[in-house]
Image (cartoon, rainbow, N blue to C red):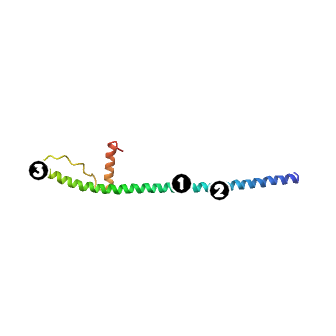
Amino acid sequence: MGGDSVDRFMEIILQMKINMAHINETLQQQTFEICQELAAIFEDQRKSLDSHLGAVDAKLKECTAHIEDYRRLYVTLAGVRQKLVQLGSEPSPLPAPLPSETMEGILAWRLDELREQGKL
């Protein structure tokens, strides 16, 4: 192999090394940009999930208030019904009492009721 051939071969290798470095740099830059985009998407979706969970929490608090209202109204209605019976009237039956003292039990019972009725 002559000197010119070796020089030409070395130039080709050097050019390949430069090209590979450029490709590697481009790949790293694209990887970095994709990582940033995915991180932004992840953050948006995480915030959305947090928001949804907050909405669920708010509805559960609202359910708790409705359960307490139901309990109070049930006691009042049972008293009115008892007075009607004492006066000789035949009042309508009472609605179903809550089957549990815990919110978890009440929610599970209600979900089962709604499923049986085909509403869920």
Q: Residue at x 49, y 56 (%)?
A: 46
The residue that label 3 is drawn on is 87
Counting residues from the start of the chain, the first of labels 1 and 3 encountered is 1
The residue that label 1 is drawn on is 41
Q: Residue at x 83, y 52 (%)?
A: 8
Q: Residue at x 34, y 56 (%)?
A: 62
The residue that label 2 is drawn on is 29
Separation (CA) of disc 1 from disc 2: 18 Å
Residue 99 percent across, percent down from the top left: 27, 51
Q: Residue 19 has which mark?
A: none
Q: Secondary structure at mark 3?
A: loop
Separation (CA) of disc 2 from disc 3: 86 Å
Q: Secondary structure at mark 2?
A: helix
Residue 87 percent across, percent down from the top left: 11, 50
Dividing the picture into quadrants, the one containing residue 51 is bottom left
In front of the other: 30 or 5: 30
Task: Tell me if mark 2 has few (under 14), some (14-19) or many (20+) residues whose alpha carbon lies within 10 angstroms of its own.
Answer: few
